[in-house]
Image: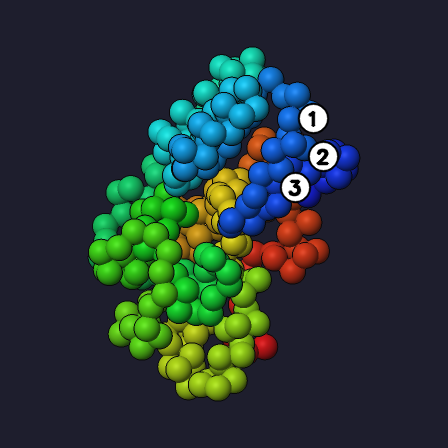
Amino acid sequence: MPYAYVNHARFSKLTPVASGGASSKTYEEALATLHPDIIFTNSSDMETVNTLQQKLKIPVVVLSYTGIFSDSVYSALTLIGDIMGTQERCAELITAMKGWQNDLNNRTKDIADMDKPTVYAGAVSFSGGHGIEGTYAKYPPFVAINAKNVADETGKDGSMLIEKEKLTVWNPDIIFLTPGNMQLVNDDYKTNPSFYSNLKAVKDGNVYSQINYNYYGCNIELSIADAYYAGIIIYPDVFSDVDFEAKADEIFKKMLGQPYMQILKDSGNGFGKIAIGK
């Protein structure tokens, strides 16, 4: 969660108002002592939201959005700006995001499917970490660059677990894995190395990283960086003018206020090739 790292000193001084986690409990008394003018939440349980609002006599605003580049994201930012009086900053972010969205799409939208390598995102985190069988159909960074994601053949949308044998049938040209879940992948490799060594992407050395960007919500700056990195790997010719590290830190500086690439590297979450089993 880059925003938590960047704001650590500030956050450490704040009063905890919830337990955190998937089934987070709100500390209503602690929240009331802060006397906020407004409360923002992403809770989808409107009964809980209404009860909180009635009990504390404080307006509660629900923010709901999906994906990376979507009208729901832009609408949520606009709403925050209108309420908080930060319209200029929110408009700046929306303009920057739409610029990256258009750049990624324009570079790749006219590439014929037959000319695209097949790709797969594995070891994706959702409700915890997963091995290579954890994947994502309509994976937002791939959608942003019009990639040919083999998991889309399932007809599903979102995170899921597949039977590993399905991956041998798809046999994608390029595989992306989450560095934070490589221990799970490597442990499985020890029990069945032939499964991995027979995959085309592994044999050809085309296994790369995708940084996990979901942690009880979407860390959008990371997902956009993932999209650029995937684009550079999948379509090297059309992204040949892009210096990835410079582009990633451009995104981070715009959205977080500071560079973040070195922090990712230092935490073992850098971008690059991955050697399975090592």
Whether residue 237 is visible to the viewer of this picture, yes or no, is no
Q: Earlier in the sequence, mark 3 or mark 1?
A: 3
Quarter holding the N terminus is top right
The residue that label 3 is drawn on is 4
Q: Earlier in the sequence, mark 2 or mark 1?
A: 2
For the point 62% across and 37% down, the residue is: 27
Quote the CA–CA distance across marks 2 and 3.
15 Å
Q: Is residue 185 above or below residue 23?
A: below
Mark 3 neighbour class, 10 Å CA radius: few under 14, some 14 to 19, many 20 or more = few
Q: Left or right: where does residue 30 sit relative to residue 230?
A: right
Q: Callout 1: 10 Å neighbours few (<14), some, many (20+)?
A: few
Which SS class for mark 1? helix
**Which residue is the site of mark 2?**
15
Q: Quadrant of residue 15?
A: top right
Q: Amino acid at mark 1?
A: Thr
Secondary structure state at the residue bearing disc 3: helix
Q: Quadrant of the C terminus?
A: bottom right
Judge whether 40 appears above or below 18 on screen: above
Residue 182 in the image, given as x and y percentages of width and height:
55, 69
Whether the residues at callouts 2 and 1 have beta carbons within 8 Å, the answer is: yes
Q: Are marks 2 and 3 in contact (CB under 8 Å)?
A: no
Horizontally, is 268 left or right of 110 in the view? right
